[in-house]
Image (cartoon, helix red, strand yellow):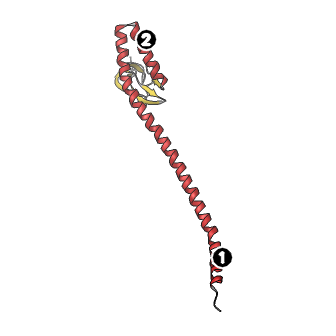
Amino acid sequence: MKKSKLQKKEGEKRENNDVLPEKLVKLEEQLRRALADYDNFSKRVEGKRGEWEEMAAARVIDKLLDVYDDLCRAEKHLKDHGLTMAVNQFWAALESEGTAKIKTDGEDFNPETMDCVQVVEGGENKVTETITCGYRLKGKVIRPAKVKVGKGIAKREG
């Protein structure tokens, strides 16, 4: 016996009804993955944007630190009250952006935050003089300090 057209269509509908739930599950899984990928992508872009902003800020602050250092040198020589006020205000602005000086004088030499420009008599591995101040921006070194480091005093045999 041949199946009527109506019976064939009903058979096809049953087969489609059996396949549809599987297709739906696959599509839902693809959608979940696509949404997760998009969420991860958004987080990566946001993280990168933060890094780019920090790098741009570090470049600008580094240029301003050259000016600040020159103003500090001028202040030492001129001893002008107005200049001292301007230097203090300039530093306050840099500090409000997260800039901090790296402590050096009398400290142990730290190659992560300091560059040794000369080894001199003095306490072993101690900074004896700061040639150029070093700075951090939000905890990251943007300019290492240039320092003189003691080589230690050799014991004399008598």
- C-alpha separation, residue under disc 1 versus residue under disc 2: 87 Å
Residue 69: quadrant of the picture: top left
Judge left or right: residue 75 versus residue 6.
left
- Single out the residue that lies furthest toward the bottom: 1
Residue 36 % position (x, y): 56, 52
At numbered mark 2, what does the secondary structure look like: helix, strand or loop?
Answer: helix
Mark with earlier residue (1, 2): 1
Residue 84 % position (x, y): 41, 11
Residue in view at x 64 percent, y 86 percent: 4
Image quadrant holding the C terminus, namely top left
The local crowd at label 2, few if under 14, some if 14 to 19, many if 20 or more residues have their Cα within 10 Å, is few
Kindly identify the amino acid type of the residue bearing the numbered disc 1: Arg
Residue 57: quadrant of the picture: top left
At numbered mark 1, what does the secondary structure look like: helix, strand or loop?
Answer: helix
Residue in view at x 44 percent, y 35 percent: 53
Residue 62 % position (x, y): 38, 27
Q: Is residue 43 above or below residue 53?
A: below
Q: Is residue 68 above or below residue 26?
A: above
Residue 99 % position (x, y): 46, 25
Image quadrant holding the N terminus, namely bottom right
Kindly identify the amino acid type of the residue bearing the numbered disc 2: Met
Residue in view at x 57 percent, y 58 percent: 31
Q: Which residue is mark 2?
A: 85
Q: Which residue is mark 1?
A: 14
Please state which of residues 77 and 146 is positioned toward the viewer in this rendering.
Answer: 77
Judge left or right: residue 29 versus residue 156.
right
Please state which of residues 139 and 95 is positioned toward the viewer in this rendering.
Answer: 95
Judge left or right: residue 96 versus residue 133.
right
